[in-house]
Every structure is written in structure tokens, then in C-alpha cells.
Image (cartoon, rainbow, N blue to C red):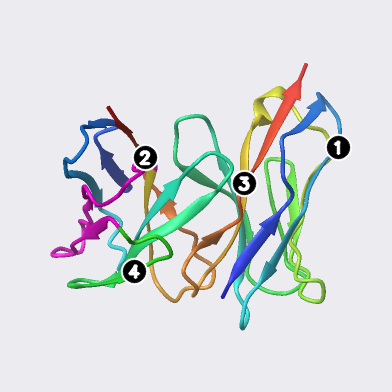
Amino acid sequence: GDSVTQMEGPVTLSEEAFLTINCTYTATGYPSLFWYVQYPGEGLQLLLKATKADDKGSNKGFEATYRKETTSFHLEKGSVQVSDSAVYFCALGGSYIPTFGRGTSLIVHP
Amino acid sequence: DGGITQSPKYLFRKEGQNVTLSCEQNLNHDAMYWYRQDPGQGLRLIYYSQIVNDFQKGDIAEGYSVSREKKESFPLTVTSAQKNPTAFYLCASSPPGQRNTEAFFGQGTRLTVV
């Protein structure tokens, strides 16, 4: 079945460090890809999305590029802030039942 | 404002008791979903519905039941058959079949067995 694999956390960084969270997917067909963010005790919020190969989604300094050849959608940010501390979920969706990875906890220290 | 409302935010269940979690949306979405979140396990799909009066089991449906009598509402009942119900439950909705549309989530219900 369809699935998403993302790197395990926690990822611990100092403020202004570079962030990468790896995500790969398995799906029959051609899903849309998403990154969501979850703050403690809350639901998930959309961070960014891409609907076709080579599309780059971006928001709040975060970026991810849809790589069909490697079935990947890695999340990056050039300079993280303490306020970025949260759990990040990679997901496939669009015309598919939304399917999520296990989540990666990011902790940013001042 | 359009959105998804889950209630209650916190719920306590005694052993052997059924409890129902509410999920209401005013986004006019056809599809609705229930997920269970446990630490380190991400979101696991319990049930989903793509149209009124129809729903499908997800990956972990045992011990749960749902109904979809109205487009706006998709309540989840955690029955006494669910042996380990303590978890964070998330309801979501989306317009089905649209590539560029994400799922929208409620704020969640934290269920604890006492």
C-alpha cells in the first residue's frame, strides 16, 4: 500500500543552523506531497505542498522539492529559529487518502 | 470562519465504557477522516468517509465505530472492545479528488482511560 517514510527524531539544532528532514514515499500512481507542522496539543497545519514532479513548495523559509525519480520530498530551511520547534509530518494526498509519516520532532536551542 | 471543530478537548473513559468523540466541519468537504496519534507512531487511519451514509475502515478500525448521517458531522465512538484507547484523536476533512488541496485538521481530542 501507499506509505511515507521520514527520518526519526528528535532533531536538535542551534538557532540559525541548517535543517534537513528526509522524506520518501511509496505510492501507485502520482500523489501530491505535503509537509504539515504540529505544535504541542494541537492539530496539524499545512506547511507547504507540491502537486507534480520538480515542483518546489515553500513557506516561512521552509522548502521542499518533489523528486519523482527518487520518490522524495525532503524538507529544508536555511536558518532555523526557536519558534520552529515542533513536530513535522510528511504526507501524500491530493486524490489519495492522506497518508502520513511518523513525524520528526525538531528542537531548536537559542 | 470555516474549519473543523472537535469536542471535547479532553475526555476520560472508565474501563468498559463507550465514549463518543465529536467532529463537525463547515468547509463543505465531502471527505472526512479519523486518525489516532500515539507517541512515535505518527498518524494511523481509523475510519474515513467520502460521502454521506458511507464509510470505510482504515488500518486500525477494530474497537471503533463511526457514522456519517450528515455531511458536516463524523462522530467516532470508542467502544469497550478497544483495549488500549488512550491516545490523541484527530479528525480531518478534505475535498476528494483534488490534487492541490490539503487535509484540514481539528484541534484534537485527548482520550485517557482511568
Task: Identify the residue at image location x=73%, y=74%.
Answer: A53
The image's mark for residue B57 is: 4
Give x and y (percent) for residue A52.
Answer: 68, 74
Please name the amino acid that badge 4 sits on: Lys
Q: Give the range drawn in magenta.
A: B63-88
Q: What secondary structure is found at the residue carrying circle 1?
A: loop
- Mark 4, chain letter? B
**Gap in angstroms between the C-alphas marked 1 and 3:** 19 Å
The earlier-in-sequence mark between 1 and 3 is 1
Residue B27 magenta-drawn?
Answer: no
The earlier-in-sequence mark between 2 and 4 is 4
**Gap in angstroms between the C-alphas marked 2 and 1:** 31 Å
Residue A89, relative to residue A99: is it above or below? above
The image's mark for residue B108 is: 2
**Gap in angstroms between the C-alphas marked 1 and 4:** 40 Å
Residue B70 or B36: which is nearer the viewer?
A: B36
Residue B67 magenta-drawn?
Answer: yes
Report the residue marked by disc 3: A103
Is there a contact, CB below 8 Å, between mark 2 and mark 3? no
Task: Identify the residue at image location x=74%, y=56%.
Answer: A64
Q: What secondary structure is found at the residue carrying circle 4?
A: strand
Mark 2 or mark 1, whichever is nearer to me? 2
Along the horizontal axis of the image, is B6 left or right of A44? Answer: left
